[in-house]
Image: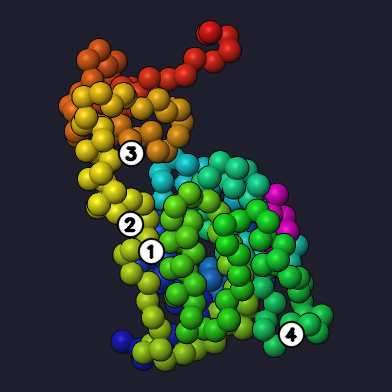
Amino acid sequence: MSSTMRGADIVARSLERLGCRRIFTLSGNHIMSLFDAMLETKIKLVHVRHEAAAVHMADGWGRLTGEPGVAMVTGGPGHVNAIGALFAALASESPMVLLSGHAATGELGRGGFQELRQAEIAEPVTKASWTAKSTSGLAGDIGNAMRIARQGRPGPVHVSLPSDLLDEIVDVGSIAWPNGHDGPGASILGSNAHRTLRSFLSTPFFPKPVLPRSNHWSGLAMRSHSHATGPAAGSRSPASPLSRCPTIPGPAEQ
């Protein structure tokens, strides 16, 4: 096994370690090294025709699975094209991560190729937005982005990846790899919070929660309720926890 690793491979291996299975992307000069690195992983690339589509798909993935969806676009205009779609992800509280290519660090402030203040542009429509500072820190950047996207109230996170950091080779020993607490399989609620929630739901006078069917939290709450109290009477589909969740009637039904 090699004792050194390229920055792009660090990003790809970090995503794979954290359980990422699919990336929605549109290729461009700044991120071609990432496309090359993904060939050495089991991650599938879904290539789109507009950067906003990649973000919308990652947004949808986050809503449906509860796992952070990952979108990857090139820097400059590619990044700007993706920004509008982040509004929808933020409003929907969807866990997702946008990875954008970026001008090389040595060219910043000197009119580098497609140089923009990308982190500042994305900041108003994300939970967190920053530019990677070092090659050995890329694994930590990916781990933090995935964790923040799911932590507390879910939402989109952006990280810009300068092209020179992706091409730089560093010693493997200098890499602090992300752990399971950062990835899609990590629990949103700690074990103590789960026990407290189940205790409340098992109380006889505690009413069944009224939650929208489309909300990812509905499944979590109803799964906890079913563990505590068993199947609700008159449920339409015992196989689906959401079928036991009462819904709020719309204007036409009231």
Relative to residue 167, is residue 17 drawn left or right? left
Residue at the (49%, 64%) spot, across then down = 145
Query: What's under tag 1, amino acid-wise?
Result: Asp
Query: What's under tag 4, amino acid-wise?
Result: Glu
Asked if one can make out residue 233 in the rendered structure from this viewpoint, the answer is yes
| Residue assigned mark 3 | 220
N-term-proximal mark, 4 vs 1: 4
- Nearer the observer: mark 4 or 1; the answer is 1
Q: Do labels 3 and 1 touch, CB within 8 Å?
A: no
Asked if one can make out residue 69 in the rendered structure from this viewpoint, the answer is no
Residue at the (58%, 67%) spot, across then down = 159
In the image, residue 81 lies in the stretch drawn in magenta? yes
Q: Do labels 2 and 1 touch, CB within 8 Å?
A: yes
C-alpha distance separating marks 2 and 4: 38 Å
| 77 up-or-down from 199: above or below | below
Q: What segment carries the magenta color?
A: 78-85
C-alpha distance separating marks 4 and 1: 32 Å
C-alpha distance separating marks 3 and 1: 19 Å
| 53 up-or-down from 126: above or below | above
| Residue assigned mark 2 | 186
Task: In this rendered view, identify the residue nearer to me: 38 or 241.
Answer: 241
N-term-proximal mark, 4 vs 3: 4
**Residue count near mark 2 (Cα–Cα under 10 Å), binned few <14, some 14–19, many ≥20:** some
- Element at label 2: loop
